[in-house]
Image: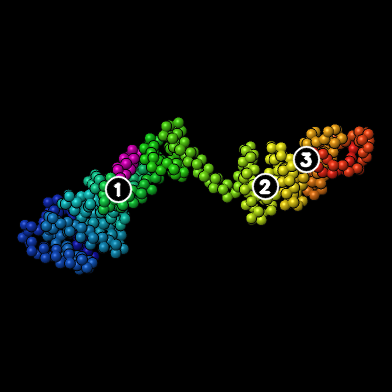
């Protein structure tokens, strides 16, 4: 046990030596040959992943020349890999902590002795600290900051998610101001956008990294940015996708949620475009629906007061339904036609024909007969040359109301009300007597009605 502690302590002493010794090469070393031999041997074992065999040779090469030949950082990067293997296999928490410390010190030496690799080294260091070593956020966050400062646009995309996670944690726990969090967000997105546009080899990786980190940043985005930021953020996307309903809705709602006034020119433009696109989409969908359902289109036109157009659509629907054999809907559309022809176009004969077709298609339906009764009643003032003949039209109307309620109890109340209204308009008995007509006689109603009725008199 004492030997193990002494060995670790001795190595920690080695890796924490001065910058001069930790950057020493074998170039002018009196042990140059031995160090190079150890280097070659351990590198061979590294290639075959025989890490236990490689370790003692690496240790000898590292101690003799930490910076190798001054051109290649292998003694640092391979040392990190060897100790990472030990770290992953180790179960003792204290031992894992010791290995973690050694790995970080090797990284720091690598950065110190090979400054040209600083951006790369910090990117690898952050990755290991965050995903494997479980280093404290305070240390990993500092490494992230150093990585961005050292790398600028060359900062590795592997830094994005760790840095975003730490920034969100720090902000949510009061360890970072909104301005500090915002600056990191903007800087990382700037680096990502630069590489997406200019880095041919790794642009796709920067895009993935950006998407992933911004999902994390979304947790605090509303808190650290104001309306102006979101306007600037969304405007390019809005200009490029002005026909996307979901995007326009999202952008508008987001801007309003961030305190943007709806009178703001850009917000108003987004809203207007959204309403325009929704209207066009709805119109297209409705047109497609109406193309398949002309009867429903006819009903809509009827409600809009476009009666001639409605009749054309009902005719189209009737032809369609004849092929399908849907009698119930056919009855509805014939009834619609009858209503329009009677009430809006004064085409009484045609209206009656269509009402009767509707009645035949749906036995026991009283409404078509109620409609015909209304036609007869409305024609009573113009059907006939005298009061008696006009009264015959009233009898015809009452007969239709009576028949309607006899087959359909749902119209009974309406039918009784109308019958009661028109009873006083039946022919006058004295006038009929002067004409030689008695109650019960059969008489043909004049004009377009043409039906034969049994004469009845008003009380």
- Residue 306 position within the rendered picture, expressed as x and y whole percent measured from the top left: 62, 38
Instruction: State the image quarter where residue 324 is shown.
Output: bottom right
The dot on residue 196 is 1
209 over 54 or under it: above or below: above
Q: Is residue 313 above or below residue 322?
A: above
Query: Any magenta on residue 115?
Result: no
Residue closest to the eye, 391 or 193: 391
If you read the primary sequence from the N terminus, does the residue marked by circle 2 or circle 3 appear first?
Answer: 2
Residue denoted by label 3? 448
Q: Secondary structure at mark 3?
A: loop
User: How far from the left and from the top, in percent, is residue 139?
Assistant: 28, 49
Residue 414 falls in which quadrant of the image? top right
Residue 14 horizontal/vertical position (percent):
16, 57
Camera-nearest label, 2 or 3: 3
**Quadrant housing residue 132:** bottom left
Percent coordinates x, y for residue 177 in the rendering: 34, 39
Where disc 1 sits, the SS reads helix
Local crowd size for mark 1, using a 10 Å CA cut-off: few (<14), some (14–19), many (≥20): some
The label nearer to you, 2 versus 1, is 2
Q: The C terminus lies in which quarter of the figure?
A: top right
Q: Which type of secondary structure does the marked residue at label 2 adopt?
A: helix
Q: Which residue lies at the image location 41% right of the left edge and 43% below the top edge?
A: 241
Estimate the spatial distance between the alpha carbons at disc 2 and disc 1, rounded to whole Å: 61 Å
Q: Residue at (44%, 35%) from the top-left corner?
A: 269
Residue appearing at x 85%, y 38% in the figure: 392
In this rendered view, identify the residue nearer to me: 19 or 3: 19
Residue denoted by label 2: 333
The magenta segment: 177-193
Q: Nearer the viewer, residue 395 or 277?
A: 395
User: Gap between marks 3 and 1, in whole Å?
Assistant: 82 Å
Q: Main secondary structure of the magenta part?
A: helix
């Amino acid at each position: 046990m004492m030997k193990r502690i002494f060995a670790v302590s001795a190595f920690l002493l080695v890796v924490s030596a001065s910058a001069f010794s930790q950057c020493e090469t074998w170039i002018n070393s009196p042990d140059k040959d031995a160090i190079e031999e150890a280097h070659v041997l351990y590198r061979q074992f590294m290639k075959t992943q025989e890490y236990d065999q490689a370790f003692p040779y690496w240790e000898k090469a590292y101690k003799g020349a930490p910076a190798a030949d001054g051109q290649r950082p292998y003694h640092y990067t391979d040392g990190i890999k060897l100790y990472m293997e030990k770290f992953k296999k180790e179960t003792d928490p204290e031992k894992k902590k010791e290995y973690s410390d050694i790995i970080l010190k090797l990284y720091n030496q690598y950065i110190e002795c090979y400054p040209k690799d600083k951006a790369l080294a910090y990117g690898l260091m952050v990755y290991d600290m965050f995903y494997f070593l479980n280093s404290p956020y305070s240390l990993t966050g500092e490494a992230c900051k150093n990585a961005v400062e050292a790398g600028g646009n060359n900062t590795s995309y592997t830094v994005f998610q760790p840095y975003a996670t730490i920034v969100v944690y720090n902000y949510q726990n009061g360890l970072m101001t909104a301005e500090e969090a915002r600056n990191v967000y903007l800087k990382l997105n700037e680096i990502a956008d630069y590489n997406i546009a200019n880095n041919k080899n790794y642009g796709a990786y920067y895009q993935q990294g950006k998407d992933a980190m911004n999902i994390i940043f979304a947790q605090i985005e509303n808190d650290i940015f104001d309306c102006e930021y979101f306007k600037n953020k969304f405007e390019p996307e809005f200009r490029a996708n002005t026909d996307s309903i979901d995007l326009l809705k999202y952008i508008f709602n987001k801007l309003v949620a961030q305190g943007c006034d709806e009178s703001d020119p850009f917000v108003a433009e987004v809203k207007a475009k959204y309403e325009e696109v929704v209207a066009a989409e709805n119109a297209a969908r409705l047109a497609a629906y109406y193309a398949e359902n002309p009867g429903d289109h006819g009903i809509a036109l009827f409600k809009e007061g476009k009666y001639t157009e409605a009749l054309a659509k009902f005719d189209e629907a009737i032809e369609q339904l004849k092929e399908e054999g849907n009698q119930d809907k056919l009855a509805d559309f014939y009834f619609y036609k009858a209503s329009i022809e009677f009430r809006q176009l004064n085409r009484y004969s045609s209206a009656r024909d269509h009402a009767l077709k509707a009645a035949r298609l749906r036995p026991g339906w009283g409404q078509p007969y109620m409609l015909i009764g209304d036609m007869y009643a409305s024609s009573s003032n113009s059907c006939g040359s005298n009061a008696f003949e006009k009264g015959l039209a009233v009898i015809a109307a009452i007969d239709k109301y009576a028949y309607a309620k006899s087959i359909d109890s749902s119209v009974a109340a309406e039918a009784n009300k109308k019958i009661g209204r028109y009873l006083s308009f039946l022919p006058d008995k004295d006038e009929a007597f002067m004409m030689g007509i008695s109650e019960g006689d059969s008489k043909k109603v004049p004009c377009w009605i043409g039906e034969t009725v049994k004469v009845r008199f008003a009380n």
